Image (spheres, grey):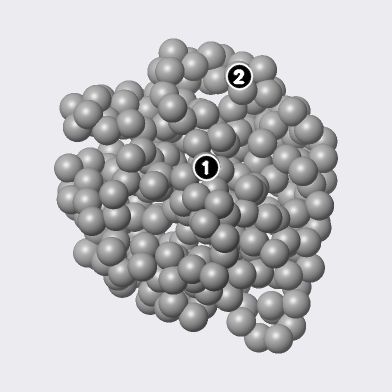
Amino acid sequence: MIDAHFHIWRQADLPWLVGPMQQRIFGPYEPIRRDYPIEEYLADAAAAGMTGAVYVQANWAPGRALDEVRFVADSAGRAGFPVAIVAYADMLAGDIRPALDALATEPSVRGVRMQLHWHANPLYRFASGPDLARDPVLQRNVAALAAFGWSFDLQVFAGQMESAAELSAACPGVTFVLQHAGMLEDLSEAGIAQWREGMARLAAQPNIVSKLSGLGTFLRKNDPAHTAFILRETVALFGAGRCLFGSNFPIEKLWTTYADLVAAHRSAAAALPEADRALIFAGTARKTYKLT
């Protein structure tokens, strides 16, 4: 089993974990405003039988992307646990190549994430605008990831999925990993319809896979019924070979245990064929992030 989305950190390295609380899509986060080392992550994940994991950038201080990947690589080496790294790079930079070349000095790097999510609700807003995916500079820089064999972790809301599909079409040599199954935050009939339409648009792009992670973000709880709904809808659109599990720990630790989180996902996938479950919980992550 592979966890395709987790974080570790030292509190002092992340501006949003020190000083005043900041606005985050997952709400108040006082219990995780502290160090979260790999040893604690492995203790949390122990019962699930993880054999590898994918670290996703956690918004370190500006200019410290290489420090972040070195910290993670050193932590993984110390723990003797295989970890692939999705690093940060400013994909709006005029010349992205120096940043990517620097990241490439760490062989564990497998991709890049720059969060593009923007919402009319300011509580859910992160990026500077709703349509950064259409920015020609960003499209050019994301396309540059192909030369490294790296993916782009794509974080957008339903209202941004049309532009996200355009981005993936403009970069056919890059695999896009949709974060948190498209971050369904509006559970009204209209909200679900918009999400489903956007997800179908993204699924039509063959270079997009969907990460089944962060499903408790907007509920502030681990809800097995909600997990089952998202998994069922996402697998129907993308197929199991384009879906992968991620814990989003320690964010999800705000409201659940690792064991209960995995149990909800396994229960949601129980009706699928064994081969499909193997893809969701290991195979797709291994292929997408080039894990050995």
Which residue is pictured at 32% across the width and 46% down the height? 50
Q: Is residue 103 above or below residue 156?
A: above
Residue shown at the point (69%, 45%) measured from the top left: 208
Q: Amino acid at mark 2?
A: Phe
In the rendered image, the vertical position of residue 71 relative to residue 47, given as above or below: above
Q: Is residue 240 left or right of residue 15?
A: right
Residue 151 appears left or right of 23: right
- Secondary structure, mark 1, is helix
| Nearer to me, 291 or 8 | 291
Which quadrant of the figure contains the C terminus?
A: top left
x, y percent for residue 193 = 75, 77
Q: Earlier in the sequence, mark 1 or mark 2?
A: 2
Residue flagged by tag 1: what amino acid is it?
Answer: Gly
Residue where numbered disc 1 is placed: 283
Q: Quadrant of residue 91?
A: top right
Residue 201: quadrant of the picture: bottom right
Compared across the picture, whether 187 is left or right of 76 comes to right
Identify the residue under disc 2: 148
Which residue does the image show at 61% across and 70% down from the upper left? 232
Of badges 1 and 2, the one in the foreground is 1
Residue 155 in the image, given as x and y percentages of width and height = 59, 52
Q: Is residue 115 above or below residue 188?
A: above
Q: Secondary structure at mark 2?
A: helix
Q: Position of residue 179 (x, y in %)?
A: 56, 53
Q: Are marks 1 and 2 in contact (CB under 8 Å)?
A: no
Q: Is residue 223 left or right of residue 101?
A: left
| Viewer can see residue 81 | yes
